Image (cartoon, rainbow, N blue to C red):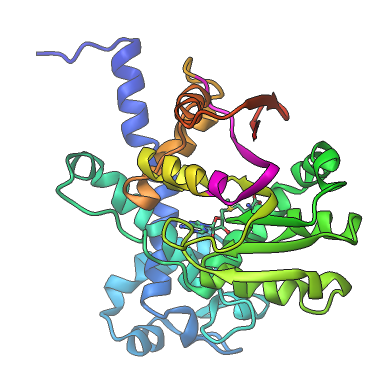
Amino acid sequence: MFFPENELTNYLSKISTTFEVNTAEAGLLFAAIELDLFDSFSKDPLTLEQLAKKVDVKKERLLPLLNGLCIMGLLIKDEGFSFPEEYFPFLKKGGRFYIGKALLRFKWTIENLSNLSKIIKGEVEVKGHDVHDEISTAFYLDFVREFNKPYIKIMASRLEEYFRNAKTLLDIGGGHGLYTQKALKEHPHLEGTLLDLPHAIDYAQNLHADKDYFSRLHLLKGDSREVKIEKKYDVITVNDLLHYFTEDEKKDLLKKALGALNEGGVLAITKFSFNEDLTPESSVFFSIKNFLLTGSGYLCTDESLEKIIEELGVKIIKEKLDQNKTLYLLS
Ligand SMILES: C[S@@+](CC[C@H](N)C(=O)[O-])C[C@H]1O[C@@H](n2cnc3c(N)ncnc32)[C@H](O)[C@@H]1O
């Protein structure tokens, strides 16, 4: 029998095979990190034999990896193999900007994707969901704070009318703290509190400790799903946090945040826009990515968040900040 070649079968075979190229590069990188290969190098080149001895594997097994790393530009082949010195701080353990361990986070994505059917059935737990170590957190928050720069500006001006009369702000899952920073800088009467997981709070502490508004920035370590919010606040913000949570967790957190508002206060929530017609497409994959990261959380559609909020019986204002972000103001 000949296999029928048509648009569908071409598409299916393309998506089942083209991932190999990038995945192979990722696999080589992860293998090199796990074998401590980069740690074997100092300034001088090493022969295949020397490298094989250092990482304690057979040379003919190591060679394909070394060749691949050369093609990727991570090693140089010239009278043996060498590792560019400018990469040492990033890929040698103990280097100032060592990211090897953080990069291995992404290895779990491959494993999790391969296990997706079992994860959906609940037979296999996702890998890596519980890792919030210092390096991974810093790596991640560096990216998020850069990505959200435009929204920090937009939100500061959108919430201006609330900050003008507010004395206190709570930023749940505030991470880098730059939303709060902007509010504190523009409103000298405001006290801000960041609530986040321990390593994110350490990251924020490093970022803000020497700034003049730091005496008005209060840092709270904890899982927002578990901590009891002791005080009341005039403004509470929840930016890009709910996509980590299940439907019940989203609802419980919003209930808790509403319960922590002072009379006349406002709860501002931003999320990546995601519509029932599956636009924007990037949100479909972002939602899957978060499911794979947490094992249970996901980016919900704007419509389904609205349903949750309606059940809470509060007044909602919905606004699109741009194509990709939606803001909800609850009071
Ligand atoms: C995508 S970042 C958003 C940071 C910031 N709010 C922003 O919008 O730029 C998500 C933040 O939520 C924090 N986070 C994740 N799960 C959390 C939890 N269970 N409790 C508190 N914070 C959490 C992460 O540590 C991270 O700082």
Give residue 74's quadrant in the image: bottom right
Closer to the camera, 194 or 96? 194
Residue drawn where x is 46% and y is 37% of the image: 299
Which image quarter has ligand 1?
Answer: bottom right
Give residue 4's quadrant in the image: top left
Q: Is residue 132 left or right of residue 99?
A: left
Q: Position of residue 203 (x, y in %)?
A: 64, 72
Q: Is residue 313 left or right of residue 50?
A: right
The image shows residue 38, relative to residue 141, as above or below, that is: below
Q: Is residue 141 left or right of residue 24?
A: right
The image shows residue 97, relative to residue 65, as above or below, that is: below
Give residue 176's quadrant in the image: bottom right
Quarter of the image with the N terminus is top left
Q: Confirm whether the magenta stretch covers residue 264.
A: yes
The image shows residue 107, relative to residue 207, as above or below, that is: above
Q: Position of residue 324 (x, y in %)?
A: 64, 30
Q: Confirm whether the magenta stretch covers residue 263.
A: yes
Regarding residue 179, the answer to whether it shows in the image is yes
Which region is colored magenta?
A: 257-275
Closer to the camera, 34 or 195? 195
Q: Main secondary structure of the magenta part?
A: strand
Residue drawn where x is 54% and y is 85% of the image: 45
